[in-house]
C-alpha cells in the first residue's frame, strides 16, 4: 500500500519543491548550498578543534558584555599620542603608491590642515617620498575612521570607555555629507570646516561631555534601533538623542553664544553625526573578543579603498585581505558607477557587531538611500543570522518580533554557506577631491574568508 507524505523537506533547486507543493503537500524549503570551493578539508579540521565551541561562546559573550560610554573629547595628539607627520587611515595597512583617490585626497587635505604644506596639492611629494610622514591603520591605535578615515594630530576625537575594564576606543568627529575630507575632498571650504571643528566644536563638546558626565552610547544604540535607525547609514534618532543629552551642558559651557548656536545647528543638521560614536562603540565591543584562541569569530571588517580586510578573534592582529568591491546602489546627481571608488572605510565595524547592513530590518527607510526594497531589508537581516554565532538581546528588531540582531560573524559559517556579510555604505568618488558620489550595498571579496579559515586550520593542526 502506498501513502502520500504529509510533509516534505526539500534542499537545493525549487523544481522538486514546486512539484510537490502543486500536489497539496506541505514543503519546507531549505536554502542549502555547497561550501566555498576548496574549503572542505579546512572546515573539517576547524570543526574538530576541541577549543572552538567554548572559544566562540566566550568571544560572543565578551562582545555582548561591553558597555560603551562617551567619557571625553580631546585632540588625537593627546589621546592617541600622534605626532606631527603621523597619519592614521581606514582599513588594513597600505602605502601611498597603492592608495586610492579618496584616501590620497584625505591625506592631502590632512597635510594642509596640519600646516605641513600650504596647498594640498603640494602634499603629493611628501607622501611619495615619505619625508617626515607616516601612515598607519586606525585599527592599530584603538580607533576607527569612516570612509578614508584619516586622522591627524590636531583632530578632536570621541573617547569611549567600557567601565568594567577601562578599555578605550576613539573616533574623529563627523563632518557631514558631500564634499568632506573623509570622502577625499580637500577644497578650501573643507579645510575651513575642519579648522572650525578643531577650534570651536571640539572644545565645546569636551566641556559638555566633562560637564554632563559619561553618555551611555550603548543605551542610545539600543533605543535608536527601535526608532528606525540601523546605526551605519541612518543615525537620525541617535544624533538627536545625543544632542538631547549634551545640549544643556553646551549652552551652559560659558563659550561664546554664537559658537554654541552654530554648533547646535551643525550637529542637529548632520544626521550622520552619531555614526562616529556608533563605530567606536562597536570596536570597543569587538576588541573584547580579540586573542581568544580557537575562536572563528570576525572582530573587524575594514576597507582602505583598495583592499578589504578582516581580522579574526583566534588569529591575533593578522589581516586577511582581497580587492575592495564597488558598491551597487544610488548615485548623486549625474554620477554613475564609473565615478565610484571601490568600498572604503572602517564603518563596516557596525556590521561586524550586528548593526548597519545586518540590522536593515530595523530601518526599512534605508532602502531609499542605498537601494533595494523593504522586503530586501527584512530578508537581509534574516539571512545574516545564518552566518553568525548568536543574537544581541540588547539590540532588537521590532518588525521581527524583537529578535536580537545577528551577532558574531563566524568564518566557518561563511565558508560553509557561501553567504557573505552585507554592508550598506557611502560611495566616494574615485578621483581625489571629488567627495561623495552615492550610497549602496556591498559585500566583502569572497576569498578572504577561506584565507582566514586556512589560517585557523593551520593553528588547529599545530595544537594537536
Image: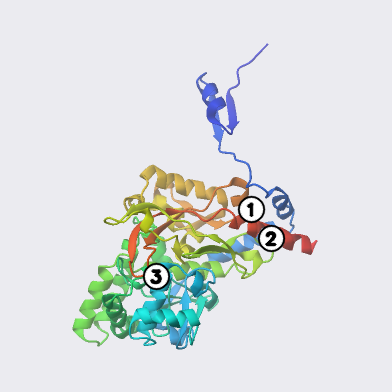
Describe residue 267's horizontal placement relative to residue 232 as left or right.
left
Which mark is first along the chain, 3 or 1?
3
Q: Quadrant of residue 357?
A: bottom left
Task: Work out whether mark 1 precedes mark 2 in sequence or the reverse, and give the earlier one.
Answer: 1
Could you say which is closer to the camera, residue 429 or residue 268?
429
Above or below, comparing residue 412 to residue 162 in the picture: above
Marks 1 and 2, how far apart at CA: 10 Å
Q: Position of residue 358 (x, y in %)?
A: 46, 54
Q: Secondary structure at mark 3?
A: helix
Give the mark nearest the N terminus, 3 or 2: 3
Q: What residue is shown at x 72% (from left), y 58% (from top)?
A: 457
The numbered dot on residue 456 is 2
- Say whether residue 203 is visible: yes
Q: Residues within 10 Å of mark 3 (few under 14, many from 20)?
A: many
Residue sitting at 27 percent across and 80 percent down?
192
**Mark 1, residue position:** 412
Residue lying at the far top of the rendered structure: 1
Q: Which residue is mark 3?
A: 276
Q: Quadrant of the N terminus?
A: top right
- In terms of secondary structure, where does tag 2 sit? helix
User: Which residue extends farthest right?
Assistant: 464
Amino acid at each position: 500500500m502506498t501513502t502520500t507524505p504529509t510533509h516534505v523537506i526539500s534542499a537545493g533547486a525549487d523544481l522538486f519543491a514546486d512539484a510537490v507543493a502543486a500536489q497539496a503537500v506541505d514543503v519546507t524549503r531549505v536554502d542549502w548550498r555547497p561550501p566555498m570551493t576548496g574549503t572542505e578539508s579546512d572546515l573539517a579540521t576547524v570543526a574538530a578543534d576541541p577549543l572552538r565551541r567554548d572559544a566562540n561562546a566566550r568571544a560572543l559573550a565578551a562582545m555582548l558584555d561591553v558597555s560603551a560610554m562617551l567619557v571625553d573629547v580631546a585632540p588625537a595628539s593627546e589621546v592617541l599620542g600622534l605626532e606631527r607627520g603621523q597619519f592614521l587611515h581606514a582599513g588594513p595597512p597600505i602605502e601611498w603608491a597603492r592608495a586610492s583617490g579618496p584616501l590620497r585626497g584625505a591625506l592631502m587635505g590632512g597635510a594642509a590642515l596640519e600646516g605641513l604644506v600650504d596647498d594640498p596639492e603640494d602634499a603629493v611629494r611628501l607622501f611619495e617620498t615619505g619625508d617626515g610622514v607616516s601612515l598607519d591603520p586606525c585599527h592599530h591605535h584603538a580607533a576607527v575612521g569612516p570612509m578614508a578615515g584619516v586622522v591627524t594630530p590636531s583632530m578632536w576625537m570621541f573617547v569611549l570607555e567600557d567601565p568594567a575594564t577601562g578599555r578605550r576606543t576613539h573616533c574623529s568627529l563627523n563632518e557631514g555629507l558631500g564634499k568632506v575630507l573623509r570622502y577625499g575632498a580637500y577644497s578650501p571650504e573643507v579645510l575651513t570646516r575642519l579648522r572650525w571643528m578643531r577650534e570651536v566644536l571640539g572644545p565645546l563638546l569636551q566641556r559638555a561631555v566633562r560637564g554632563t558626565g559619561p553618555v551611555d552610547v550603548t543605551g542610545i544604540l539600543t533605543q535608536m534601533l527601535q526608532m528606525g535607525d540601523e546605526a551605519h547609514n541612518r543615525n537620525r534618532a541617535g544624533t538627536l538623542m545625543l544632542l538631547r543629552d549634551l545640549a544643556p551642558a553646551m549652552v551652559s559651557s560659558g563659550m561664546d553664544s554664537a559658537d554654541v548656536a552654530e554648533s547646535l545647528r551643525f550637529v542637529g543638521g548632520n544626521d550622520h553625526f552619531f555614526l562616529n560614536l556608533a563605530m567606536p562603540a562597536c570596536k570597543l565591543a569587538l576588541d573584547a573578543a580579540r586573542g581568544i584562541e580557537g575562536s572563528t569569530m570576525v572582530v573587524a571588517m575594514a576597507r582602505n579603498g583598495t583592499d578589504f580586510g578582516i581580522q579574526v578573534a583566534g588569529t591575533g592582529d593578522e589581516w586577511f585581505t582581497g580587492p575592495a568591491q564597488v558598491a551597487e546602489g544610488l548615485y548623486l546627481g549625474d554620477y554613475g558607477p564609473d565615478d565610484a571608488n571601490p568600498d572604503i572605510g572602517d564603518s563596516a565595524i557596525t556590521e561586524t557587531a550586528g548593526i548597519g547592513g545586518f540590522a536593515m530590518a530595523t530601518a526599512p527607510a534605508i532602502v531609499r538611500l542605498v537601494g533595494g526594497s523593504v522586503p530586501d531589508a527584512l530578508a537581509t537581516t534574516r539571512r545574516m543570522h545564518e552566518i553568525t554565532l548568536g543574537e544581541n538581546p540588547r539590540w532588537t528588531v521590532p518588525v521581527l518580533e524583537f529578535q536580537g540582531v545577528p551577532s558574531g560573524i563566524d568564518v566557518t559559517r561563511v565558508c560553509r554557506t557561501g553567504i557573505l556579510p552585507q554592508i550598506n555604505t557611502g560611495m566616494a568618488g574615485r578621483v581625489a577631491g571629488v567627495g561623495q558620489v552615492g550610497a549602496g550595498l556591498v559585500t566583502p571579496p569572497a576569498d578572504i574568508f577561506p584565507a582566514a579559515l586556512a589560517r585557523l586550520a593551520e593553528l588547529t593542526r599545530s595544537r594537536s
